[in-house]
């Protein structure tokens, strides 16, 4: 009895995870079918871009600014010990653009936009508004999901580019203050050492993370049951699942893209 209970728990977790992954994959296929050729509500797309992209700009800039400062503070000991102050631009740029920027901004985006989307769609599902759209011959995927998917991918890519720039600006200023690394040395070293592929990698990761957050939040939102408590569970599951998927995809994409 003591042996079968843990096995059952592991099996139950595996089955639940497989169910959710399969549901999200099925939703992704349905999204792609409506993107080729494009079948989405343009006014809804504009509203989503405004709400998800523009209104997230301030919190993303604040996050990126702090990331740049923390990066220099953490690097100060090692850079100063080994006399590599001239390499601060490359170290800060590589870490921020390739890894730290896309991942941290995606997690922040998931907590703000992904949670909101899961709650919004979950509320529409439990109040039967989604069924109402079907009764009016309106496809919920084309009207609700596809605009949010496109808006999240575009918004996160744009916010990542802006966030990386802000993080590097704050890192250069902090490097000048803490390590006496002048701006010219910082930026010339950064542009000399980084390649176009480094910048492309950051954009690709941001697009992948945006797609993950969109599919996960929409999937949990549209499968919500149980009224208001169910909406809360969907929001929690969407944020946690998005975070786990972001880390997994970040590892795989880094392994593949180098």
Image (cartoon, rainbow, N blue to C red):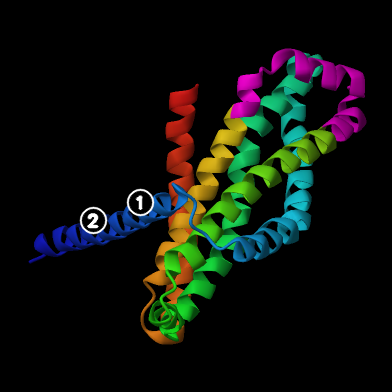
Q: Specify the segment rendered in magenta.
A: 172-200
* Figure check: 88 above or below 49: above
**Which residue is tagged 1?**
29
Identify the disc placed on residue 14. 2
Few, some or many residues within 10 Å of mark 1 (<14, 14–19, 20+): few
> Would you say the magenta stretch is mainly helix, strand or loop?
helix
Residue 115 image position (x, y, % from top left): 55, 66
Residue 245 image position (x, y, % from top left): 43, 48
Label 1, secondary structure: give it: helix
* Figure check: 18 above or below 177: below
Estimate the spatial distance between the alpha carbons at disc 1 and disc 2, rounded to whole Å: 22 Å
Residue 175 image position (x, y, % from top left): 85, 29
Quadrant position of residue 114:
bottom right
Going 50% across and 56% down the picture, which residue do you hit? 214
Few, some or many residues within 10 Å of mark 2 (<14, 14–19, 20+): few
Going 52% across and 59% down the picture, which residue do you hit? 40
In this rendering, the label closer to the viewer, 1 or 2: 1
Magenta residue check for 167: no
Quadrant position of residue 199:
top right
């Amino acid at each position: 009895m003591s042996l079968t209970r843990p096995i059952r728990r592991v099996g139950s977790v595996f089955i639940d995870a497989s169910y959710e992954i399969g549901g999200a994959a099925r939703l992704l296929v349905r999204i792609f079918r409506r993107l080729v050729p494009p079948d989405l509500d343009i006014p809804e797309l504009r509203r989503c871009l405004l709400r998800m992209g523009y209104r997230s700009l301030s919190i993303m800039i604040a996050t990126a600014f702090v990331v740049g400062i923390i990066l220099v503070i953490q690097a100060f000991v090692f850079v100063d010990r080994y006399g590599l102050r001239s390499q601060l631009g490359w170290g800060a740029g590589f870490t921020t653009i390739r890894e730290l920027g896309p991942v941290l901004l995606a997690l922040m985006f998931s907590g703000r936009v992904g949670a909101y989307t899961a709650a919004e769609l979950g509320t529409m599902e439990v109040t039967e508004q989604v069924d109402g759209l079907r009764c009016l011959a309106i496809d919920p995927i084309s009207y609700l999901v596809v605009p949010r998917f496109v808006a999240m991918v575009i918004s996160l890519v744009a916010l990542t580019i802006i966030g990386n720039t802000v993080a590097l600006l704050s890192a250069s200023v902090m490097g000048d203050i803490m390590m006496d690394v002048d701006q010219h040395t910082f930026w010339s070293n950064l542009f000399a050492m980084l390649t176009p592929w480094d910048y492309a990698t950051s954009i690709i990761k941001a697009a992948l993370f945006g797609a993950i957050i969109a599919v996960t939040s929409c999937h949990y939102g549209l499968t919500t049951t149980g009224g208001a408590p169910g909406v809360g569970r969907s929001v929690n599951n969407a944020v946690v699942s998005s975070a786990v998927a972001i880390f997994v995809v970040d590892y795989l994409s880094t392994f593949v893209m180098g």
